[in-house]
Image (cartoon, rainbow, N blue to C red):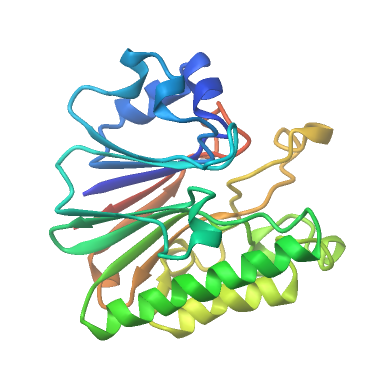
Amino acid sequence: MKIITWNVNGIRAALGKNALDWAFAQQPDVLCLQEIKARPDQLKEEQQVRDGYEVVWNPAERPGYSGVATFAAASPLDVTLGLSAPRFDIEGRVIRTRHPNFLLFNIYFPNGQRGQERVDYKLDFYARLLEICDELHARGENIVITGDFNTAHMPIDLKNPKENETTSGFLPEEREWVQKFLDHGFVDAYRRLYPDKIQYTWWTYRFAARARGIGWRLDYFLVSEKLFPRVKDVVVHEDVQGSDHCPVELSIE
């Protein structure tokens, strides 16, 4: 099974650049998009669907902001939107779909760079998600969490860690929450497979950062420890253009 995650930084912009053609050409079983910044009724009818895929939308209430969409080649067995928490759910950040062997969370985690209030919101979001995942693990569920975590976990995950120690996205309290997920039965699939490999998934549009290799690894697949032996590979498609993020692909038996 092939799952691709991609923060497209606006689905209308991505469609205008034909960026999603690459993703669908890979024939993923599931494509998880984040930061779609649109409702489906803002797209042309032919843009709302893709042959061979069922799509689940969860746009934000605020126009042009946040939002996620999941395209699945086989109809999900069950679909849940949000975290059952209105303060988070109005921002359209979570789609949970059930597949034959696991639950898949497609998530656009909050960005904390607009001040302490948003950092606190982000940390509360992590906490609410972990609470749900702990309950699911206790019931014996296997889980895959993917999307834009908006946090680089370790110094290896960004080009300039020392300079960004006080920047949201690499704050100690944000990194601690990523670690909590790993301490609660999850594996960072890419980092487990490639402990010393340096690749990034996001580059600011400023300063020619992408061309200069100044990036952050923000897009992850966290996989339940019990499910990890079935992971075949995680590929960072750093050369694929169309967004300030690149797609990341999980292959799982």
Q: Position of residue 101 (x, y in %)?
A: 16, 63
The quarter of the picture where residue 94 lies is: bottom left
The front one of 224 and 195 is 224
The front one of 19 and 9 is 9
The reply to whether residue 33 is visible in this rendering is no
Above/below status of 177 relative to 244: below
Above/below status of 13 relative to 230: above
Above/below status of 11 relative to 178: above
Residue drawn 44% across and 70% down? 192
The front one of 84 and 228 is 84
The quarter of the picture where residue 154 lies is: bottom right
Q: Position of residue 13 (x, y in %)?
A: 56, 21
Image-based side of 186 in relation to 62, left or right: left
Q: Position of residue 230 (x, y in %)?
A: 22, 65
Q: Say which quadrant the C terminus sits in.
A: bottom left
The quarter of the picture where residue 166 lies is: bottom right
Residue drawn 67% across and 71% down? 174
Image-based side of 249 in relation to 240, left or right: left
Residue drawn 74% across and 45% down? 214
Q: Position of residue 222 (x, y in %)?
A: 41, 65
Above/below status of 237 relative to 42: below
Residue drawn 37% across and 75% down? 133
The reply to whether residue 141 is visible in this rendering is yes
